[in-house]
Image: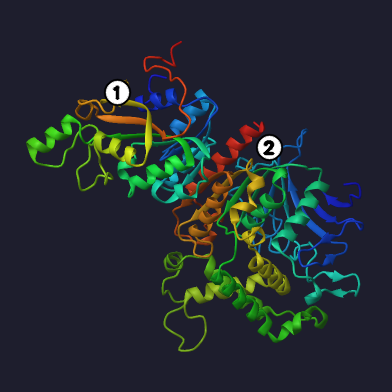
Amino acid sequence: MAALDLVTSAGGGTWRFPANAPLRLDSGGVIEGLEVAYQTYGQLNADKSNAVLICHALTMDQYVASPHPVTGKPGWWPRLVGPGKPLDPARHFIICSNVIGGCMGSTGPASINPATGKAYGLSFPVITIADMVRAQAMLVSALGVETLFAVVGGSMGGMQVQQWAVDYPERMFSAVVLASASRHSAQNIAFHEVGRQAIMADPDWRGGAYADHGVRPEKGLAVARMAAHITYLSEPALQRKFGRELQRDGLSWGFDADFQVESYLRHQGSSFVDRFDANSYLYITRAMDYFDIAASHGGVLAKAFTRARHVRFCVLSFSSDWLYPTAENRHLVRALTAAGARAAFAEIESDKGHDAFLLDEPVMDAALAGFLSSAERDRGLT
Amino acid sequence: MSHIREDFREILRLVRPGSRVLDVGCGEGALLDLLAHEKQIDGRGLEISAEGVAACMARGLSVVQGDADQDLDHFPDRSFDYAVLSQTLQATRNPRHVLDELLRIADRAIVSFPNFGHWRVRWSLLSRGRMPETKALPMPWWSTPNIHLCTLADFIALAADLNLRVDASAAFAGKGPARPMNPTGALENWRAETCLFMLSRNGAAPIGELPSVSDDLFAG
């Protein structure tokens, strides 16, 4: 990549697409001067074989292993990434970039449209998971990496990993897909639609042009987050954590947050609006709804992976995940098997719901650590 | 390597170097690991427990959580040279379908099972009038996973019905070494405690000369 334009600090920066090679989108649109914000951890080794790409989920970002600049919270995947962890900056060159359409530095609907000098808002083109991955592939090349040792992600991150295996199988050695799906179900789309409608029903949304009016649809975005958050947890986990416990003695006989679960959800909603853009939420949920790998391969998922036979896949699902249930993950594994790819798959027993992939699950930890270390051995990294 | 299970030793003998092997019910991957090291096979596994799969992943094995009844259907035709089903056929819901599937996805199936026609089983039932509990079948009737037990003669009849050919057969007793047997021999249905067969479809290319049972691959 000759026209490398790296505005980089140690361990991260923003990469701008060269003017002569804009990102072409599935929708047919083009984004001029697209920027991709990313973080890196560790060093690329001499033969450039130790690079790992981590793909983030819907509301995550590139700060996988360093403090979040807005919330100050530590990296979001400490169980997987860090010193002594399966992905270790001492051994791996770890890349994590904000998806396009996002709001943590990569170009998205909140970015300024150079043609108008105003925020894109709804004039931002609709993007897809494949568009996100295409941008990542360009970034990875710009960072001097031809082949990734592993592409890793959970939930929407797992969708990107699958898309990598479809579009760039020759550029990856292994793939880790956690709690994901190869297409959105009607229920998945339905929950996302509730979230989008909540945002668009907020009077401060202003047809998506809220930035021009100096307001933000915070109430709508908070409700969207509250509804989505329920889908990330299991019913037993909610019951165990909150039951019918009250915030204070007695009922208010009104509509305050009497129950602890209400207070918890309100907090989830109100803290989310500090770090996330409402229009980004619309665009990224849309990208997930449009995601359907089989659709572009004659309706046969296995056909999508025929070029990925050499890739070793690790797919894990969680027994209480009703957002991307085991059946969806198994559907992917069967397609990988039918394609002749090297797939390992396990359903982890957990009552923590969809979010389990980020939480303390010893069997998952053992499986992931084992998978990655054996892949490292076969890649000649250890 | 004296701790190798005798049936694994026999499978190791049968499998050709560098072949593609599917181990159905692979546990923690001991057999696949052994075959990978000794015969440089390209192995895949199917295992019902998440812990077993996790252990296999740690060994670098490509193993999918699933079972013989439900997951064989998703493998493409003739994607393996061998499909191994060790001591599991009798625990499947539809053994006939499973056997048929093994020989759809692989050119050869290696299948072992406890012989319900063994004299100890017959004697146990005859003398006590209770469901047999023997070394090969140690669990009581109410907790055994074995829902489709068969005798050697039953198995041979099923294989014939599916138009399968027996390419190799061996019998085990206790922890002793394998001995070759004639599966249609009059006394084998009494003598063989555990049977192991290698099968292929009639009409498939015949397998070449097999090493004799007495060859010790681990000698020296």
Camera-side mark, 2 or 1: 1
Q: Is residue A12 visible?
A: no
**Residue drawn 65% across and 41% down?**
A88
User: B190 or A9: nearer the eye?
Assistant: B190
Q: Report the residue marked by disc 2.
A: A91
Q: Residues within 10 Å of mark 2 (few under 14, many from 20)?
A: some
Name the residue at 33% across, 38% down. Answer: B159
Return the chain for callout 1.
B
Q: Chain of mark 2?
A: A
In this rendering, position of residue A138 left or right of residue B36: right
Rounded to the nearest angstrom, the CA distance separating label 2 from label 1 is 54 Å
Q: Nearer the viewer, residue B204 or B195?
A: B204
Task: State the residue position of label 1.
Answer: B181
Are the residues under marks 2 and 1 on the same chain?
no
Q: Position of residue B58 (x, y in %)?
A: 52, 37
Q: Residue A378 at what x, y percent from top left?
A: 62, 33
